[in-house]
Amino acid sequence: MKTIHLSIDGKEIECVEGETLLWVALDHAIYIPHLCLMKEMEPFGACRLCFVELEGEDLPVTACTTKVKEGMVVSTRGAKALRLARTALELTLSNHPVDCAHCLKSGSCELQKIAKHLRVKLNTKKFKKFLRDRPIDETSSVLIYEPSKCVLCGKCVRYCQEKLEMNPIGFAYRGFQRWVTTFDDEPVGLSECGGRIELAEICPVGAFVAKNKGNKKNIVNPVRKGGASNPTLP
Ligand code: FES
């Protein structure tokens, strides 16, 4: 393992060559928005929120798919990267009800955190609103699944596939109709994931939440508790 040096937002950092830029930044208290990845998962590149700029490169890159190199100079606050990340967030919000006042995940929701960081209004009207009209599924004894809140990050699907080595849930359909569902659209309570409370912990928004309302303030991303935060963005 070779130790290298790079700078992110002017902060000098020492790390191991070949590590993923996103995790290096987060491990050094530099927040880069991300929804679709957990540590030890292969990058999926779905959320497009983790754009950064590299000195000498014209186009922003996604931090989750970029490996660190000696001498790299990274900015998380470049105008081009922020414009892309903000647009990705606004598109995500256009498919989300943003009903925070009635959401069990409010306060620990990654969308709220990212919107605040990127200075995007949660009720942005930049894109036409399009919500998935699917019923709330309360058939599980431990989970509530609310498809209209899903941001299609895929973390729950990949957690089941990669960590549990089973496929109780997956993506169905395409475009605006795309959603996460069980095999044959059976109720969540009847599927293999029905008792998996960790889905509520993995879900970055209020799509999967724990049934016990007392858990409201305890639902956090188990991989990145707390986390870094950056100074105000331009
Ligand atoms: Fe990089 Fe989602 S974390 S695209």
Image (spheres, rainbow, N blue to C red):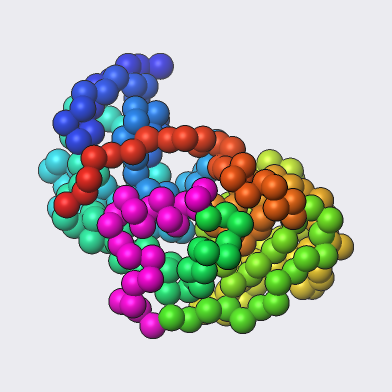
Q: Is residue 118 above or below residue 185?
A: above
At 39% from the left edge and 29% from the top edge, which residue is drawn? Answer: 27
Give how far across and how far down residue 57 sits, in percent. Answer: 16, 47
Give the residue furthest to the right: 190
Give how far across and how far down residue 73 sits, in percent. Answer: 18, 34
Is 160 on the left or on the right of 37, as rendered?
A: right
Closer to the camera in the image, 103 or 169? 103
Q: Which residues are magenta?
A: 107-128
Closer to the camera in the image, 182 or 111? 111
Residue 167 magenta-drawn?
Answer: no
Q: Quadrant of residue 134?
A: bottom right
Whether residue 72 appears in this view of the structure is no
Give how far across and how far down residue 64 sits, in percent. Answer: 40, 44
Give how far across and how far down residue 150 sits, in percent. Answer: 57, 65
Residue 112 magenta-drawn?
Answer: yes
Q: Is residue 210 above or below residue 149?
A: above
At 81% from the left edge and 70% from the top edge, which residue is drawn? Answer: 186
